[in-house]
Image (cartoon, rainbow, N blue to C red):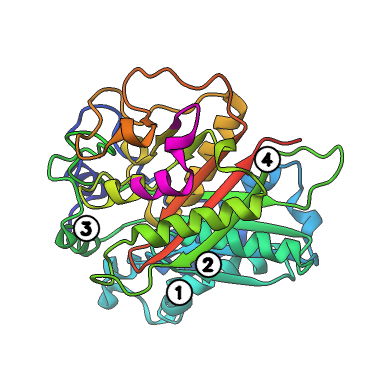
Amino acid sequence: MRSRADIAAAHFDGDGDGPAVFDDAELRTDFIRFRISPRQARVMDPQHLLVLDCVERALEDAGIRPQDLAGSQTGVFVGMSESDSVLTIDPDEVADSNRSYLGIGNSRGAAAGRISYTYDLRGPSWQVDTTCSSGLVALRHGITALATGEVDLALVVATHLVRSSFGMMVREATGALSPTGRCRAFDAKADGFTVGEGVVVVVLAPEKAGARSLGQVHCAVNHDGRTAGLTVPSLDAQRDVVERALRMSGLASADVDYVEAHGTGTPLGDPIEIGALAAAYHTAERTTPLFVGSNKPRFGHLEAASGLLSLVIAMETLQRGRPPRTNASGQPSETIPWAEYNILPTIGDFAGPDSIDSVGISAFGLSGTNAHAIITRPR
């Protein structure tokens, strides 16, 4: 079995900081404070511990004491599509007394329930798996639950962790991993993505006068339907989900200044995505270009957590008033008619907009489920 360092290094060329991955020490989160026994922790998926730790941090960042939520109608919506930790466990080395924990400890569905159990939350609690769009689909569930009054607060969580060599082998078989070990989304040298890992937690609450807010968010979800293949993306479906999100937000297409795109750096996916954005945002008719970037070159592809990571980056973009740089250097892909579309990728040195008031966010699942969110600056 290769070490986690070996798995990460095998898909990164060493130029720069590398993709976001957990080291072994980070996976040994203090389980005692979450009332998890050593026997349970020994055989459970570390993601269950990581999401608990990040939920606690997110609540504290929002000015909420976790203990104050006990008994509340707080909903938990977890985007999670990978749980291969059990493949790293040798059953012969697991004591009989620990084997009963293997099932629940490695269940993706239990990740959400464990959060609700730990903090005594009484709202709906479930796990979402639409592969790479899981985080934004979980966001949609959280927004809907708040809007209908089903919950008073929503914890939207997304997580991605690859622990086994088998997990990397499966990704290699898709042909989507970069053979050069570098994701170059929208770049002339783009040849796929690298794998990243992480946990993202966002706290959603109804808008209240005087309350601290990082923005108002809307999210739409659809599916490609029948295409040339289950994993083949649809430009029409991607355009449709963006247009739906625009209608939900009440914004005009020209009001969105920047899009945190799915942008995996694949020769098939990137041109389709940019074409869909051009059609949905009517970029050719705009007086100013639409700026487009991706977090995959900086963090690697966090898969189920990638969309929620994009939301966090979008919130930071609204605060800074400038989009982040996708690639430090390079040339935009010649297979995408950037000038015709009036779209500018955030590659190298670029002249950004004077200000940013609204940001779009895309995440597309390998199984065909698409999501697009729009976040606007707090009023």
- Tags 1 and 3 touching, CB below 8 Å: no
Q: Residue at x 51, y 22 (%)?
A: 353
Residue identified by numbered label 3: 168
Q: Nearer the viewer, residue 113 or 286?
A: 286
Taking 3 as reference, is 14 above or below it?
above
Q: Quadrant of the N terminus?
A: bottom left
Residue identified by numbered label 1: 107
Residue identified by numbered label 2: 111
Q: Residue at x 27, y 52 (%)?
A: 269
Question: In which image quadrant can residue 335 be found?
Answer: top left
SS assignment at label 1: loop
Residue type indicated by callout 4: Gly
Q: Nearer the viewer, residue 185 or 23?
A: 185
Cα separation between marks 4 and 3: 36 Å
In the rendered structure, the answer to whether residue 73 lies left or right of residue 173 reads right
Q: Taking the image as drawn, is residue 347 in sight? A: yes
Residue type indicated by callout 1: Ser
- Which percent across, then down, holds residue 49? 51, 58
Residue identified by numbered label 4: 215
Q: Residue at x 46, y 62 (%)?
A: 134
Cα separation between marks 4 and 2: 27 Å
Is 283 in the magenta? yes
Q: Residues within 10 Å of mark 1 (few under 14, many from 20)?
A: some
Cα separation between marks 3 and 2: 22 Å
- Which percent across, then down, holds residue 13? 17, 35
SS assignment at label 4: loop
Q: Quick one: label 4 or label 2, which is nearer the N terminus?
A: 2
